[in-house]
Image (spheres, rainbow, N blue to C red):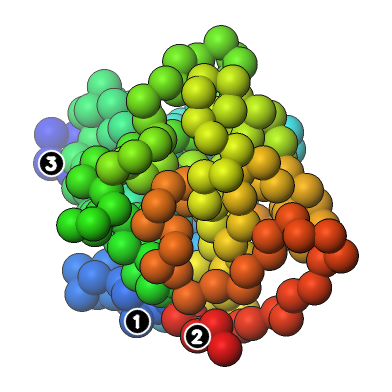
Amino acid sequence: MAHSESFKAGTVYLVGAGPGDPDLLTMRAVRLIGRARLIVHDGLVDSAILALAAPDAELISVAKQRSRHSMKQEAINSLLVGEALSGRDVVRLKGGDPFIFGRGGEELEACREAGVPCEVVPGISAAIGGGASAGLPLTHRDHASIVSFVAGQCKGLSEQNWVGLAGPGRTLVIYMGLATSQDIAEKLMADGLSPHTPVAVIEKATRPDQRVLRSLLADLGDLVAREGVKSPALIVVGDVVQCADAIDCLPLGQFQAQQITGAGANNE
């Protein structure tokens, strides 16, 4: 597309929408969402956040689910660049933080290669928001001084070396790990982690229907299946889990648990 010398490309804003609760958006994110005329958003962005957009804003969903993408990443990159080169500003709204398992780095590179201005607006990550809403400190003077983030649905899971990512003094936070939760547990135990290591599953963190389940590593796969845990969800592994406000779901014979809802609900 040929442009006159006075033509100015639009700007792509890679905006972190945080873990779900609209109150956790940054002020910069709220302003950009409110004035945007085009918002390209992920499926995990809460509807209450999308409701902050102007009535005449165009909203395009590029929702991704395991093994089923409404739009491939290359097509998303092309969409962002194409709209910006037509002169439109684009708010690319992503769950959590754009640069933590959000593929924001790829979108930034695509914009740079096309000469499109791009601004990154950080958001509260799912791990930070989820830990806080569950009363689960990812670091604690008595339990952990190291935190690791990993993607649980990455290719070649069994070939990866996870030795040292979890254990005494360490916290492991696993994104996108529901579908492979049993494999993850077996992987960690094969790499030397005790089957009695505490784990927590934080479902729909910071949202009204948040649920936090606490168990042991050996029971992780059964817990996810038994409780029908749905995405988005995080898996936290390590001694800090004992600090969480959660339902205890230990494998102690007949399973009994009371569902709790609401961010930060207390275990009675």
Q: Residue at x 44, y 63 (%)?
A: 242
Give coordinates of residue 55: x percent, y percent: 48, 81
Q: Residues within 10 Å of mark 1 (few under 14, many from 20)?
A: few
Which residue is the site of mark 3? 6
Please, what secondary structure does the residue beneath circle 3 have?
loop
- For the residues labelled 1 and 3, the Cα–Cα distance comes to 40 Å
Q: What SS does tag 1 mark? A: helix
Q: CA distance from mark 2 to mark 3?
A: 59 Å
Residue at the disc numbered 2: 266
Q: Position of residue 175 (x, y in %)?
A: 50, 44
Q: Is residue 202 visible?
A: yes
Residue lying at 47% horizontally and 46% vertically, measured from the top left: 237
Count neighbours of disc 2 (C-alpha within 10 A) and say few if under 14, some if 14 to 19, many if 20 or more.
some
Q: According to the image, label 1 marks what residue?
A: 23
Q: From this view, report whether residue 218 is shown above or below residue 189.
A: below
Residue 14 relative to residue 39: left or right: left
Residue 75 in view: no
Q: Quadrant of the C terminus?
A: bottom right
Q: Is residue 64 left or right of residue 125?
A: right
Q: Amino acid at mark 1?
A: Asp
> For the residue marked with disc 2, what is the amino acid?
Asn
Would residue 174 appear left or right of 69 to someone viewing this image?
left
